[in-house]
Amino acid sequence: MIHIDEPRLESDLGYRFGYLTEFMEFGPEDVAAIHAAAGAIAPLVPTLVNAVYEKLHHYDATWRHFLPRQSGYEGEVPQQFEDVTPDHEMIRYRKEHLARYLAALVTRPYDGKMVAYLDMVGKMHTPKAGSQELNVPLVQMNALLGFVADALTSTILSLGLKRAQEVATLRAFGKLLWLQNDLINRHYQEAIVPLAVGS
């Protein structure tokens, strides 16, 4: 039986990621499958990004989080909710961030810098990093990641890969998105309030 230093999982990002990758059996072959899909997925990134933002625009609970100034954005900020249109400069800025994120998933090595980047993806949606005004509820983050996971699955299934490669790619992305999910959820742990049972 392998001993895990549980308190260290909460304080040491590298240790946490190492434990998760070992437990999920996310290894070099998974990274290779993800990188091998880069050439096929890269041209489809704009379509994926647009699909994500169409979905986000469909609900006020998700779209309202684009009203505060986004971290790093220097342009004009909408003054009211109705001004946050899908073609607003700030939305285009956020779309570019998502496109870079998707490109990073399929091109970058999964080293310490990449782990820190994936962790920051979770943190930046809370007041702990970036804009103090930005505080996206965990339920919206889970909804978004679930949508992205399904969109990536659909994209991979549309590529016409040989069966063995298709299976390897789907499994690799599945593990990767669960890793990302953990690196989102961990930034919400202290903010979670238990749900009332019954009413």
Image (cartoon, rainbow, N blue to C red):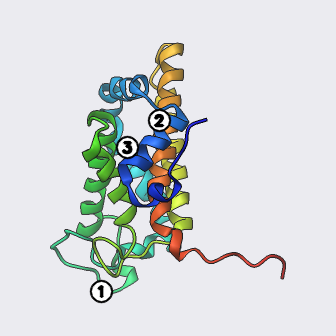
Q: Quadrant of residue 72?
A: bottom left
Q: Tell me where residue 35 appears, x and y as whole percent.
A: 33, 27
Say what amino acid the circle numbered 2 marks.
Answer: Phe
Q: Residue furthest right?
A: 198
- Taking the image as shown, residue 76 lies to the left or right of residue 117, namely left
Residue depicted at 49% across the width and 53% down the height: 182
Residue depicted at 50% across the width and 22% down the height: 168
Say what amino acid the circle numbered 1 marks.
Answer: Gln
C-alpha separation, residue under disc 1 versus residue under disc 3: 29 Å
Comparing 17 with 192, the one in front is: 17
Location of mark 2 (residue): 173
Q: Is residue 196 above or below residue 86?
A: below
Which of disc 3 and disc 1 is earlier in sequence? 3
Which of disc 1 and disc 2 is earlier in sequence? 1
Which of disc 2 and disc 3 is earlier in sequence? 3
Q: Which mark is residue 79?
A: 1
Q: Tell me where residue 36 appears, x and y as whole percent.
A: 34, 23
Q: Which mark is residue 47?
A: 3
Q: Is residue 191 above or below residue 9?
A: below
